[in-house]
Image (spheres, helix red, strand yellow):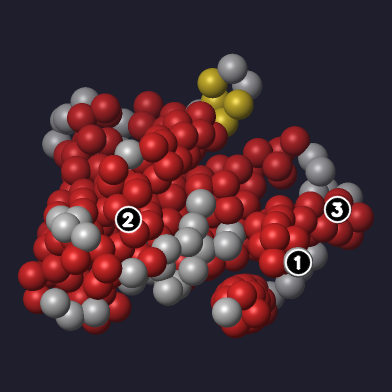
Amino acid sequence: MKIKAGLMQRLLPFLSLIVLFVALSIASPYFLTANNLTSVVRQTAVFNTMALGMTIIIVSGGIDLSVGSILGLAGLIGTMALEAGCPIALGVLIGLGVGMLCGFLNGLLVTQLKIPPFVVTLGTLGIYRGLALIFSNGLPVHRIPAAFSFLGEGSLLGIPFVLWMLVICAVAVHIVLEHTRLGRYAFAIGSNYIASVYAGIPVDFHITSVYALGGALTGLAGMIEASRLMTGQPTAGQGYELQAIAAVVIGGGSLNGGEGSVIGTLIGAFIMGLLSNGADLLNISNYWQQVIIGSVIILAVTLDEVRKRRAV
């Protein structure tokens, strides 16, 4: 019985995605068009990439509320490098590096100050956003090479380029989680922090590494966002942390740590994307979209808690 309940829990996000896809196909004649589906892929690429990084962090028992600000700061500095004449590939790497540095600092603060990651990243949310505004004087970066738009809007072999990048990132994160020491230790730390310490796991090092990796993926998401907008906005990414966390939770990740998967997160992110896209097609107010997203998060966490209580 417990095996069936566990299997149902894992299949629920996938079944929900199918039901939502079918419902939107029936509700709107524009949903199944190639242009709309391509638009969904491009729109969700940013949240998907961020959510992959958030998955590793949540699996380890942490959380990062600063990812929206990291996205804005990384995208801003990356585009400032492009404006200064850096090659596009180097500019993207700079944005990714800024994200990794911010994530590393988050991990360092969490492990060295020994205070909850919720508090640390709530503070760095304001710090990174403030730095983005200071560096830019509150003004966006516009003078960006036209070729940079290929990152977010281009296609390769008829498939959106961001989808290729997303697949590569997803495979890489899956390998890290399932086939490396960092991944195994992340699950162990998230499941039982104290036991991990007594087992001799270098907890501080691996927690810091997890946050740095999550920051790097967020930095990449920031450059994708800048490419889609063709501007470096110091205010980009506001509220995106909710989307990233929601994708992980909807996909079966646990805010208590120790649980989460790449496939689940991707499904969760696409559910979020389809909800947003469907609401636009059906002319549902953006205000109601926020209500729907919040309700879905509460429902997903409630189902997770109910499952755990039954398992005890």
How many dots with numbers? 3
Q: Residues within 10 Å of mark 2 (few under 14, many from 20)?
A: many
Q: CA distance from mark 1 to mark 2?
A: 29 Å
Mark whose residue sits in front, 3 or 2: 2
The spot of residue 192 in percent (x, y) is: 33, 69
The answer to whether one can see residue 273 in this image is no
Q: Residue shown at 33%/39% (left/top)? A: 180
At label 3, the amino acid type is Val
Mark whose residue sits in front, 3 or 1: 1
Q: CA distance from mark 3 to mark 2?
A: 36 Å
* Nearer-N-terminus badge (3/1): 1
Q: Quadrant of the C terminus?
A: bottom right
At label 2, the amino acid type is Ala
Left or right: where 301 falls relative to 175: right
Kindly indicate the quadrant of the structure image that contains residue 268. Answer: bottom right
Q: Please give the residue where the numbered disc 3 appears in the rendered image.
A: 22
User: What element does badge 3 sit on?
Assistant: helix
Q: Please give the residue where the numbered disc 2 appears in the rendered image.
A: 186
| Residue nearest the viewer, comparing 234 with 142 | 234
